[in-house]
Amino acid sequence: MRMPSEGDGPISGAGTLLGILRDGQARTRAELVQLTGLARSTLAQRLDALVSQQWIVPTEEAVSSGGRPAVAFTFNRSARVVLAADLGATHARIAVTDLATAVLAERAAEMPIDRGPEPTLTWLQRTFEEMLTETGHSMAEVCGIGVGLPGPVEHGSGRPVNPPIMPGWDGFPVPEWLGGRLGVPVLADNDVNIMALGEHWAARPEADHLIFVKIGTGIGCGIISDRRLHRGAQGAAGDIGHIRVASALDTVCRCGNAGCLEAVAGGAAMAARLRAQGVEAADSRDVVRLVRGGNTQAVQLIRQAGREIGDVLASIVNFFNPSVIVIGGDLSEAGEQVLAGLREVIYSRSLPLATQHLTITASELGDRAGVIGAAVMVVDHVLSPGTVDRSVAPD
Amino acid sequence: MRMPSEGDGPISGAGTLLGILRDGQARTRAELVQLTGLARSTLAQRLDALVSQQWIVPTEEAVSSGGRPAVAFTFNRSARVVLAADLGATHARIAVTDLATAVLAERAAEMPIDRGPEPTLTWLQRTFEEMLTETGHSMAEVCGIGVGLPGPVEHGSGRPVNPPIMPGWDGFPVPEWLGGRLGVPVLADNDVNIMALGEHWAARPEADHLIFVKIGTGIGCGIISDRRLHRGAQGAAGDIGHIRVASALDTVCRCGNAGCLEAVAGGAAMAARLRAQGVEAADSRDVVRLVRGGNTQAVQLIRQAGREIGDVLASIVNFFNPSVIVIGGDLSEAGEQVLAGLREVIYSRSLPLATQHLTITASELGDRAGVIGAAVMVVDHVLSPGTVDRSVAPD
């Protein structure tokens, strides 16, 4: 049962209005009265406040049922810009987007996360400032910053929690540090969570239940349940890289346990196996390069990895019954070589009812899933009723 | 972002009012204006309608901040009664409850579901009528009927979908058949889903993410994600009995696959294993009886089953990060004998962050989880804004 939240009182309504108008469709006062249930006088007050802050624009006329043309209102996707960053283990991607998450400028760079928080975030701050200037915008037009990090992040505070591959970052106040220097609200989350958000928003908006599996150096997934991010009780949901698989029982994982999926099917593990066979491979991108070049050992390894990941996902399909599984991360660029084994195992092991309409596909956003998702996270937050209402409510 | 639903307009509000008052706390007009955001005049209209239909009662006075005492309104849990049934493979439990799901009358009976839908539902109809009479109520006071069934049920239509142990029930229109004869709305769902609803409502209302595992003849689970039932894309979520476990690879399951959890750890499988060892055991209840009597073979089997189930749940804990796992069903009555192995494996295999605040416990409602959950399903539906508004809106 839906219970009204504190922000649901008669004072609010601007955020709800933006939520309705966000789809880009122009709507008249009469339509908005019907959709929101607000009184005409209250609606007029809200619309005036949103127009004065340029969140929406009145258009000259709209299709009307007769008589004089009605004024319609449209969401102004250029009202503000968003700064988005996807920081990985070794490389980073940064973007400036509009409020509909269209990319206005983009950069990719080598930036090892193990340099620690201050060097990384100082570089990020400078990069954001440069890119804003390039696109002709100022910090005053930025409505928020979204940052994805390659480790567990506490929801609410945006602080990393014992991140295994991020030395020096444990508990570091990323939002306060960056927000304090740039004067803009900052949200941080785990990279796989924002990838799931981005892919859902941009490529699979019709899916109620989606799982985004990132196969890179490690393996993790972001979960969309009932169209919302499922973070779990401690924000730890989606950590499937440490699920035990039979074939890995004699392999010790970097987490300390033996038999983890990541220890046989992750990019770091595969590169190590190739090196043990005398093939030069430093990381997951080298593995993909070898697979694309037709290296037999790499092809065999990645097909087997697909089956191992498929084995874990087959259980998850029975438990969770998603409508879409999206495969992303560096190794997904090996395409069908990894998807084939994964599909084979899921379709043979999961229940027919759970797989009959299941889509298993490579990420459409690819490298961009993280930055688009970081922007979606910011826009969702900025356009939520509470946030907008505080900023536009007339005194 | 929360979008207003169609029922959110100024005409509605009765359902929201009941949603607020359902907790049993008395509230004044001033409090209700604040909580709902409704105009005073609209609120008055809604309250009058609800009082005239006895959904709420005005109380003489309430604590006021000074001046004359204010009238307060309280939800009337006795306004209607609910009929609830939990139909299992071989036995059934039936209850009459009030709107706060307190049990007014209850019956347990042997009733094999494989007799088919018409004999079972005819018996259920007669039992409901008898129990209503016993409790001094009439069908006119029944606001709805909730039925749990031991198989997959299509959400919305309430029809069983290829249920493996329910011959003759595939696609049978349970709600229409029973509702047509009793003149009352009927909702049907899978038994494990309603058990999860019941346990969450009655015993674990504070848990955001809960998994209810039923270990009976088969094994399945109900999932509460973000305080709501997660059914999955085809309503197939929670079917963990057919997840593959290493120890069962040489065992063919009733589903046709080899290696299913249910084929080693379900009650039917354990009873068969005991019979193969010369121990008399027909079903899961016999297994529990033997365990309680100290039969060594049965105790060994059930401890091993606990570890097998724990192995599957360890993966689910990494994926889903629940705050509570509740163990129910016949075999849960073996208590610590099954919980010990299950906890052992989950705590050793799942990630520390996901288990640090995880509760693993036996069902508090026990045998009653299903009927309480069926009643919760009905009350949730009846008190939802759309439903109440249609029935109490003045013309």
Image (cartoon, coloured by chain):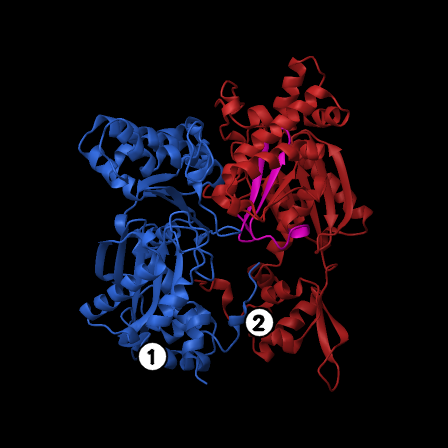
Chain colours: A red, B blue
Q: Position of residue A307 (x, y in %)?
A: 59, 30
- Marks 1 and 2, how far apart at CA: 28 Å
Left or right: B258 with respect to A268? left
Return the x and y of residue A320 as percentages of the image width and height.
50, 45
Chain under callout 2? A
Question: In the picture, residue B198 is in which quadrant?
Answer: bottom left
Kindly identify the amino acid type of the residue bearing the numbered disc 1: Gln
Q: Which residues are magenta?
A: A201-230
Do the residues at pointers 1 and 2 share their chain? no
- Read off the chain for label 1: B
Q: Residue at x 76, y 28 (%)?
A: A292
Q: Is residue B58 left or right of residue A195?
A: left
Disc 2 residue crowd, few under 14, some 14–19, many 20+, Cα 10 Å: many
Q: Residue at x 53, y 23 (%)?
A: A247
Quadrant of the image containing the N terminus of chain A: bottom left
Would residue B243 be found to the left or right of residue B107 on screen? right
Q: Which x, y percent locates residue B172?
A: 42, 60
Image quadrant where residue A330 sits: top right
Q: Residue at x 38, y 48 (%)?
A: B165
Q: Residue at the bottom extreme?
A: A67
Tell me the kind of residue under disc 2. Answer: Thr
B12 left or right of A294?
Answer: left
Above/below status of B376 relative to A321:
below
For mark 1, what is the residue? B53
Dot 1 surroundings within 10 Å: few (below 14), some, or many (20 or more)? few
Q: Give the labeled residue for mark 2.
A: A36
A202 magenta-colored? yes
